[in-house]
Every structure is written in structure tokens, then in C-alpha cells.
């Protein structure tokens, strides 16, 4: 594997990842309340915002001017509620980069 620094590193950062199957991964995910399936937003934010990690750092934004903004899991829930933009599952496929997501949300806030 080649890192952005140009250095080559051996193997995987997570030993056994190559043989780590879906069943093992599924066992580590909370799933939606009521067993309604999986949702990445719930796995990445909601379950932490509603638990003991609620005030832990979830996202650190680094501005081009050197500004730094930290967001906890609870902060991310607050941003979502303030924006009021729901993303239907049918649109997930078009949101593959952060720029796509920003453009998508911006279009809906106009």
C-alpha cells in the first residue's frame, strides 16, 4: 500500500481485515431501533449521540486559513436538525464525495 507521503507500508492497518467477514462486522453494528435494518448515519452518529460518547469528538473541520472547528456527536445531531434536510435512500448513490453532499444540501436549502 502506498501512502500519500510516498512511503510504502506493508499489509493492512487492521490485522485480519482481509478475512473479516460480513457476519463479524454485522455483529458490531447497532442496527436501527426495532431491528429495521442498517443506516450509516445511525451507525456513525445517532447511536453515539444517544449514548455515552455523545460529547466525544466526532468531526474536526480544518479551514484553509488554519481555523479549527470541533463537532461532538450531539453537535452533529443539532446541525442536522437545524438544516432540516432529509436525504432519501434513493439519492444515496449520487452522494459519493463530501462535495456531492455539500452541493446536495445547498440545493435543498435554497
Image (cartoon, rainbow, N blue to C red):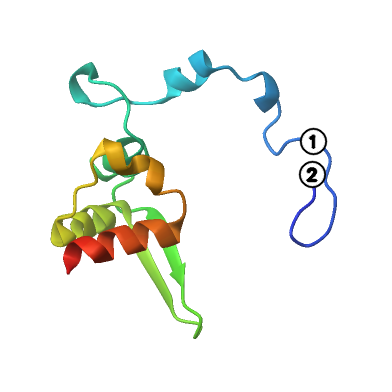
| Residue 109 in view | yes
- Separation of disc 2 and disc 1 at Cα? 7 Å
On the image, the x and y values in percent for residue 46 come to 27, 41
SS under mark 2:
loop
On the image, the x and y values in percent for residue 50 come to 23, 40
Describe residue 58's horizontal placement relative to residue 80 as left or right: right
Residue bearing the label numbered 2 = 1
Q: Alpha-carbon neighbours of circle 2 within 10 Å: few (<14), some, or many (≥20)?
A: few
Residue bearing the label numbered 1 = 11
SS under mark 1:
loop
On the image, the x and y values in percent for residue 7 come to 84, 56
Residue occupying image coordinates x 44% and y 19%: 26
**Screen quadrant of the C terminus:** bottom left
Whether residue 32 is situated above or below residue 41 in the rendered picture: above
- Mark in the foreground, 2 or 1: 2
Describe residue 59's horizontal placement relative to residue 42 as left or right: right
Q: Quadrant of residue 42?
A: top left
Closest to the observer: 101 or 73? 101
| Residue 52 in view | no
**Screen quadrant of the N terminus:** top right
Q: Are marks 2 and 1 in contact (CB under 8 Å)?
A: yes
The residue sitting at the bottom extreme is 65
Q: Quadrant of residue 30?
A: top left
On the image, the x and y values in percent for residue 65 come to 49, 86
Closest to the observer: 85 or 38? 85
Residue occupying image coordinates x 79% and y 35%: 11
Closest to the observer: 26 or 2? 2
Amino acid at each position: 500500500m502506498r501512502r500519500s507521503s510516498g512511503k510504502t507500508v506493508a499489509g493492512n492497518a487492521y490485522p485480519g481485515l482481509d478475512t473479516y467477514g460480513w457476519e463479524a462486522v454485522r455483529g458490531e453494528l447497532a442496527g436501527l431501533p426495532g431491528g429495521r435494518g442498517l443506516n450509516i448515519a445511525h451507525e456513525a452518529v445517532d447511536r453515539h449521540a444517544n449514548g455515552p460518547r455523545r460529547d466525544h469528538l466526532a468531526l474536526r473541520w480544518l479551514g484553509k486559513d488554519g481555523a479549527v472547528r470541533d463537532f461532538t456527536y450531539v453537535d452533529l445531531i443539532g446541525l442536522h436538525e437545524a438544516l432540516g434536510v432529509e436525504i432519501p435512500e434513493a439519492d444515496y448513490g449520487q452522494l459519493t464525495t463530501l462535495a456531492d453532499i455539500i452541493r446536495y444540501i445547498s440545493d435543498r436549502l435554497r
